[in-house]
Image (tube, rainbow, N blue to C red):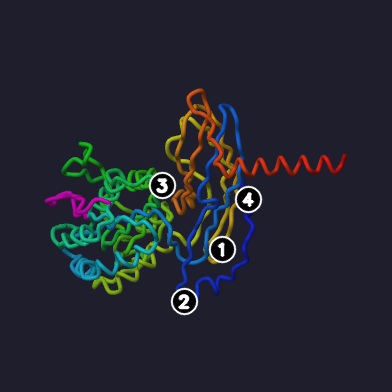
């Protein structure tokens, strides 16, 4: 189903002038109601996706580096610019970062995690500083095993937009078996299909900094059983991009920032996602919006939500606004369901006075009509 949202008509040039960034939102930001068992109430909710750069996202970004012997220039620049890279991406919202590296199956390690996903900047830079260039042997490396293990072993946060930023200068071996088991005791066999399937299963977008750019060199070279264009195929399959990264690592911070921000420049679904303690409340949301949208304009998307009381008690939960499956705004809800052990909520004294006043007004009007 393809729906057309109403547009606010905010000009893109104005929205983006001076790097202006807005905040995505959901309205109302909170809702409370008291229902009897079996009783329902339907309310309207509006999700606003603003023009410009995302600032309210729940975003998980994983940096994955080829740390074999030829990668000294790019690794040194990543280490030197680690703080700039992190600070440049932190403005996307609630951002956590992870760090990992891969070499080849004949090296001391095929893949290892340097830092698990965290919002601690010191831990992230410490992980990046663990990268050193060494090993590798032949031209192709363990890219595919590295990607698969990042996808499967990383503890991605529920509702996050998930991004892997990978950089290297050689394609991944096809058909090579990992020399050591992964976190689940499996010896992975490298293949593009397995890596892409693992990435798509977790909804991960992959941006690749390739020494050979988008041409048939570097990570796009035909080698190790891989046909030319491996990096392009992985990026295309996950909705990501390939960008040229010089062997020296020049401008690495700006290039990574631009690539990650492109993840949010366009989107094709906007939906509501209820999360939390809802056994006692039925929650039904209207259908998602599906189409081709971008952040050159501010757009609003209108939904309906129906709450139904099922089990007596007080039930707290949230409803997330989701853009391409990632949380951009959150509403907090409390639904009280009346039962024998849940008495009606009494009106405050002012409420009774108001009702009394209304009753007197009605009596006066009746006497006048008489």
Pointer 1 local density, CA inside 10 Å: few below 14, some 14–19, many at least 20: many
**Residue 203, image x and y in percent?**
40, 47
Q: Residue at x 45, y 39 (%)?
A: 316
Q: Residue at x 59, y 68 (%)?
A: 10
Q: Give me the C-alpha separation between circle 1 and circle 4.
A: 16 Å
Q: Secondary structure at mark 3?
A: loop
Q: Residue at x 64, y 57 (%)?
A: 6
Number of numbered tags placed on the structure image: 4
**94 left or right of 144 in image:** right
Taking the magenta stretch, the answer to whether it contains residue 135 is no
In the picture, the quarter occupied by the N terminus is top right
In the picture, the quarter occupied by the C terminus is top right
Pointer 3 local density, CA inside 10 Å: few below 14, some 14–19, many at least 20: some
Q: Give me the C-alpha separation between circle 1 and circle 3.
A: 22 Å
Q: Secondary structure at mark 1?
A: loop
Give the residues drawn in magenta, as a range.
Answer: 101-117
Q: Secondary structure at mark 2?
A: helix
């Amino acid at each position: 189903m393809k729906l057309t949202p109403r547009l606010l008509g905010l000009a893109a040039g104005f929205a983006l002038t001076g790097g202006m960034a807005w905040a995505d939102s959901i309205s109302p930001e909170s809702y409370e109601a008291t229902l009897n068992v079996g009783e329902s109430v339907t309310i309207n909710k509006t999700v606003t996706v603003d023009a410009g750069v995302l600032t309210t996202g729940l975003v998980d970004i994983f940096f994955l580096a080829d740390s074999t012997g030829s990668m000294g220039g790019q690794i040194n620049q990543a280490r030197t610019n680690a703080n700039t890279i992190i600070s440049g991406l932190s403005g996307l919202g609630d951002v956590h970062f992870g760090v990992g590296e891969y070499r080849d199956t004949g090296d001391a390690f095929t893949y290892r995690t340097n830092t698990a996903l965290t919002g601690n900047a010191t831990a992230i830079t410490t992980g990046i500083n663990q990268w050193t260039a060494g090993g590798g042997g032949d031209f192709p490396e363990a890219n595919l095993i590295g990607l698969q293990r990042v996808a499967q072993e990383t503890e991605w946060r529920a509702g996050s937009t998930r991004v892997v930023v990978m950089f290297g200068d050689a394609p991944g071996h096809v058909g090579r078996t990992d020399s050591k088991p992964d976190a689940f005791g499996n010896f992975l066999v490298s293949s593009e299909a397995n890596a892409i399937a693992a990435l798509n299963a977790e909804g991960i977008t992959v941006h690749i900094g390739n020494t050979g750019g988008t041409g048939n060199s570097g990570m796009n070279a035909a080698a190790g059983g891989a046909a030319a264009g491996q990096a392009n195929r992985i990026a295309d399959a996950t909705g990501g991009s390939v960008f040229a990264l010089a062997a020296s690592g020049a401008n690495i911070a700006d290039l990574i920032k631009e690539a990650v921000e492109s993840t949010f420049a366009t989107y094709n679904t906007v939906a509501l996602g209820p999360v939390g303690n809802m056994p006692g409340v039925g929650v039904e949301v209207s259908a998602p919006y599906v189409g081709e949208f971008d952040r050159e304009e501010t757009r609003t998307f209108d939904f309906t939500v129906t709450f139904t009381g099922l089990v007596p008690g007080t039930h707290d939960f949230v409803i997330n606004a989701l853009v391409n499956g990632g949380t951009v705004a959150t509403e907090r809800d409390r639904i009280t369901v009346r039962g024998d052990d849940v008495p009606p909520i009494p009106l405050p004294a002012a409420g009774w006075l108001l009702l009394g006043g209304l009753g007197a007004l009605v009596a006066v009007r009746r006497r006048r009509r008489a």
